[in-house]
Amino acid sequence: MNEPKYIVPSASMKERPEDFELTFEIPGVGKGETELHVENRTLVLKTHSTYQNPAGFKEVACEFERHDYAISVDLPETADPATVAASLENGILRVTVKKRPETQARKIEIS
């Protein structure tokens, strides 16, 4: 049995005052084909494309491949892994992770 060949997706991480946003490009992959979990402070993404031609159609030409994707990302020390949320739309997976409250900047009133 052949092991799947995984491709590392294009990824980015941005920081905002209250959270981090990670973006992954995983074209051709649906929500049901995507596994996302956290192990300690490591975010793990793994996909498996299950696309099949619709009934009655036969593929006669194809200029792109469907890939399985995998990547592990260490979250920053200030991230709270319990707050991971994700959405997938048009091949873009967006993951947000809030910062731990004690690490966020706060305004201090002076009396």
Image (tube, helix red, strand yellow):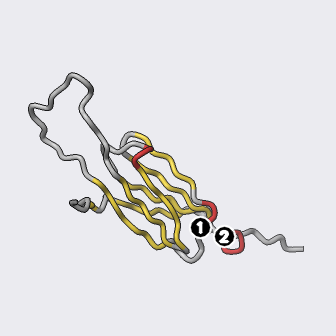
Percent coordinates x, y for residue 72 in the rendering: 40, 68
Q: Distance between the residues labelled 2 and 1?
A: 9 Å
Q: Quadrant of the N terminus?
A: bottom left
Q: Where is residue 16 in the image (x, y as percent from the top left)?
A: 56, 62
Residue at 57 percent across and 61 percent down: it is 97
Tell me residue 25's x, y (percent).
34, 52
> Which residue is situated farthest in the bottom direction here?
77
Q: Residue furthest top?
A: 56
Q: Which of 24 and 71 is in front in this view?
A: 71
**Which residue, given by chain and number where applicable, does mark 1 sit on?**
81
Q: Element type at marker 1? A: helix
Tell which of 17 and 49 is nearer to you: 49
* Left or right of 3, for residue 92: right
Looking at numbered disc 1 in the image, what kind of residue is underneath it? Answer: Pro
Q: Is residue 2 above or below residue 79?
A: above
Q: Which of 49 and 9 is in front in this view?
A: 49
Q: Residue at x 21, y 60 (%)?
A: 2
Q: Which amino acid does label 2 sit on?
A: Arg
Dot 1, how many residues are within 10 Å of its Cα: few (below 14), some (14-19), or many (20+)? many
Crowding around mark 2 (Cα neighbors within 10 Å: few <14, some 14 to 19, many 20+) is some
Q: Residue at x 90, y 74 (%)?
A: 111
The image shows residue 10, relative to residue 52, as above or below, that is: below
Q: Are marks 2 and 1 in contact (CB under 8 Å)?
A: no
Q: Mark 2 points at which residue?
A: 100
Quarter holding residue 52:
top left
At x 35% / y 45%, what residue is drawn? 29
Residue lying furthest left: 60
As drawn, 83 above or below 27: below
As drawn, 86 above or below 13: above
Disc nearer the start of the sequence (2/1): 1
Q: Which residue lies furthest to the front in this view?
A: 1
Q: Quadrant of residue 55?
A: top left
